[in-house]
């Protein structure tokens, strides 16, 4: 949700910033801007639209080795050139890029306007540049030639931030100071430590081309970048010594590798990403090995908080943990959890599931749970993310970077991590693994075969493309499933709506007759998750009900038997495996269906309108 990048080094900064913005563009892409500092002057450019629209102008600005840049996901003020970042003070001496929301900006703006400050944009961010202006004192500058940072930019930034209520990751330039001042509260900031150069970004993907050495800023910390150097301080001005971490991802992992879109690449990566989630976690004696640093004996209840796709995986995890580990589970939308004043009791474990590890609602729910004394566990993809650092213990997905705004491989890895956790708990409690009818050994056998089964499901790509051709102009879809396939129905519907802009609703199949069946007619495609599990015969009846009302059935099945063929010819056949793993395979084909429909409609699948990958505002 907005991407910021800043660089101070020896190289020409504009191409670095543009390249970084392209990597961060999945965080927001309605407008973009850049500001460079050269010989005591600021040179800036802003556009409404994509980073590609900014590129040419930015590259012709000025040669410089210090700069800041931003790609925006609008919160306050519509997408426009004037609302694009950076934002400036009255004298155009201070430039600010910001990710987050200044909640008390109207009050601050009123005060500043009374003091004579002139605002040009409708953004909350602009109060920051004027506040910094208010507190900035150039008196320490000895002469106009002395550009070595003699003013009080750091101090002015801290004074400004102390008045602010809200969240921010910011980078600030002053035309008379050879430095970049960066600060964080609630929005992620990572510092890449290079040789004679330092780079700041909202996400490690933009840092990776330069260095794997990173420092994650905590809330209420700032980084000051000067020539060859960086310093981390708290808001009281004390220097904070921080450890340098190493990013495990490679720069190659954030390339499209010949695929038209990141989303398509990430769908096809799932056989490998699942293997990576499993690696080293099941030993030869079929014991699940997880480093969960929590007293497992004390866990009496599990609460799971998550958003969007991660919430759907949580619903599947609820089945696993209750059925296999015999622990009661409650799943909450993270955004709702915090505001219902949840009861946390001794023995509660709160699991936060998040691909990015930065989702503001999930982070807020986690903090609420911690404040109330819960033990916390994270199921997270991005190592070093805020949630990853704040939980008591974590299970990392190791699914690799997920760049497509629509989450795909993170979902399958989350489901796998939840299954591992359920089995891990059951083994710890010495419970028999009651998964399916054949027990433990068969479950592990099936887990081992899962990557090849996903591969097999992906071979349906051409058939799915034909179905996408047939249904791409439908106005709305219903997705139905029961049991473990109900969250799959939700996820299939979410994928379709977020990238194709077709309204879609996921529902428990049996609930359909309590309302949504009123929508069914010959125009309405109804996607059934009808793979062979305990609810199969019931699902067939639900399909009959839709057929009787003229609905167009698309069925995801294990076998095109006569029962199915009598109901529909729109069939996606997926390989059979243990019931617990079918949600992963079924979701993979629904991801492809959504992808092809969106792609055939000419939508930029990786950057669907109104969305951002990482939702870092509440
Ligand atoms: O990074 P997180 O898993 O916390 O993100 C949660 C949701 O914002 C995310 O899953 C969102 O719903 C995706 N766009 C779904 O494809």
Image: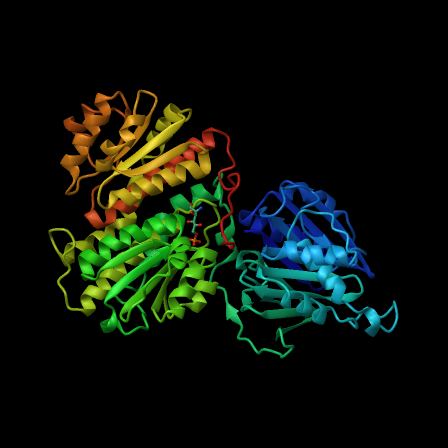
Q: Nearer the viewer, residue 364 or 204?
A: 364
Asked if residue 238 shows in the view, the reply is: yes
Counting from the top left corner in percent of width and height, residue 279 is at 32, 61
Counting from the top left corner in percent of width and height, residue 18 is at 65, 50
Q: Nearer the viewer, residue 53 or 310?
A: 310
As drawn, which residue projects farthest toward the left? 437
355 left or right of 190 in image: left
Counting from the top left corner in percent of width and height, residue 72 is at 60, 48
Say which residue appears at 47% left-offset and 46% top-offset.
404
The quarter of the picture where residue 278 lies is bottom left
| Colour mode of the rendering | rainbow
The quarter of the picture where residue 185 lies is bottom right
Image label count: 0
Q: Nearer the viewer, residue 122 or 339?
A: 339
Counting from the top left corner in percent of width and height, residue 428 is at 20, 69
Asked if residue 96 shows in the view, the reply is: no
Say which residue appears at 20% left-offset and 24% top-offset.
567
Say which residue appears at 46% left-offset and 33% top-offset.
501
525 left or right of 156 in image: left
471 left or right of 576 in image: right
514 left or right of 57 in image: left
The quarter of the picture where residue 65 lies is bottom right
């Amino acid at each position: 949700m907005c991407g910021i990048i800043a660089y101070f080094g020896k190289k020409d900064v504009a191409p670095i910033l543009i390249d970084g913005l392209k990597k961060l563009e999945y965080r927001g892409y309605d407008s973009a801007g850049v500001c460079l500092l050269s010989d005591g002057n600021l040179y800036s450019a802003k556009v409404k639209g994509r980073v590609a629209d900014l590129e040419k102008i930015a590259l012709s600005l000025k040669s410089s080795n210090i700069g800041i840049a931003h790609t925006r996901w609008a919160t306050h003020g519509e997408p426009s050139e004037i609302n694009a970042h950076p934002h400036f003070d009255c004298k155009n001496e201070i430039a600010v890029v910001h990710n987050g929301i200044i909640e008390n900006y109207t009050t601050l703006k009123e005060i500043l306007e009374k003091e004579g400050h002139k605002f040009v944009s409708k953004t909350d961010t602009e109060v920051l540049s004027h506040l910094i202006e208010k507190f900035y004192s150039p008196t320490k500058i000895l002469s106009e030639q002395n550009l070595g940072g003699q003013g009080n930019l750091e101090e002015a930034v801290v004074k400004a931030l102390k008045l602010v209520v809200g969240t921010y990751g910011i980078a600030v330039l002053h035309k008379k100071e050879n430095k970049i001042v960066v600060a964080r509260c609630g929005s992620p900031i990572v510092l890449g430590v290079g040789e004679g150069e330092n780079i700041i970004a909202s996400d490690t993907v933009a840092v990776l081309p330069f260095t794997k050495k990173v420092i994650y800023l905590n809330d209420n910390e700032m980084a000051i970048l000067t020539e060859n150097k960086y310093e981390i301080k708290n808001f009281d001005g004390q220097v904070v010594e921080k450890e340098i971490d190493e990013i495990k991802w490679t720069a190659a992992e954030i390339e499209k590798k010949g695929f038209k879109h990141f989303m398509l690449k990430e769908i096809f990566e799932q056989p490998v990403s699942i293997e990576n989630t499993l690696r080293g976690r099941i030993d030869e004696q079929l014991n699940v090995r997880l480093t969960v640093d929590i007293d497992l004996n004390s866990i009496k209840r599990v609460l799971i908080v998550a958003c969007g796709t991660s919430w759907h995986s949580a619903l599947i995890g609820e089945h696993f943990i209750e059925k296999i580990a015999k622990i009661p589970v409650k799943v909450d939308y993270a955004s709702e959890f915090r505001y219902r004043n949840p009861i946390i009791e001794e023995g509660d474990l709160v699991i936060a599931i998040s691909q990015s590890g930065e989702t503001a609602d999930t982070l807020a729910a986690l903090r609420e749970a911690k404040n109330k004394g819960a033990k916390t566990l994270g199921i997270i993809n991005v190592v070093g993310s805020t949630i990853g650092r704040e939980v008591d213990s974590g299970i990392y997905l190791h699914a690799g970077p997920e760049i497509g705004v629509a989450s795909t491989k993170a979902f399958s890895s989350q489901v796998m991590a939840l299954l591992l956790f359920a089995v891990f708990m059951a083994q710890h409690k010495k419970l028999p693994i009651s998964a399916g009818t054949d027990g433990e050994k068969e479950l592990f056998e099936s887990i081992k075969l899962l990557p090849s089964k996903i591969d097999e499901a992906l071979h349906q790509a051409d058939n799915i493309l034909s179905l996408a051709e047939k249904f791409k102009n439908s106005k709305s879809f219903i997705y139905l499933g029961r049991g473990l396939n109900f969250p799959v129905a939700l996820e299939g519907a979410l994928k379709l709506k977020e990238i194709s802009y077709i309204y879609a609703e996921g529902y428990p199949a049996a609930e359909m007759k309590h309302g949504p069946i009123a929508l069914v007619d010959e125009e309405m495609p109804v996607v059934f998750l009808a793979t062979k599990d305990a609810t199969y015969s019931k699902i067939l009846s639900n399909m009959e009900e839709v057929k009787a009302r003229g609905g167009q059935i698309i069925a995801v099945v294990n076998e095109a038997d006569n029962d199915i063929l009598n109901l529909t010819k729109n069939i996606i056949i997926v390989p059979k495996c243990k019931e617990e793993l079918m949600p992963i395979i079924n979701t993979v084909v629904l991801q492809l269906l959504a992808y092809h429909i969106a792609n055939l409609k000419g939508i930029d699948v990786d950057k669907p309108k109104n969305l951002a990958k990482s939702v870092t505002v509440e």
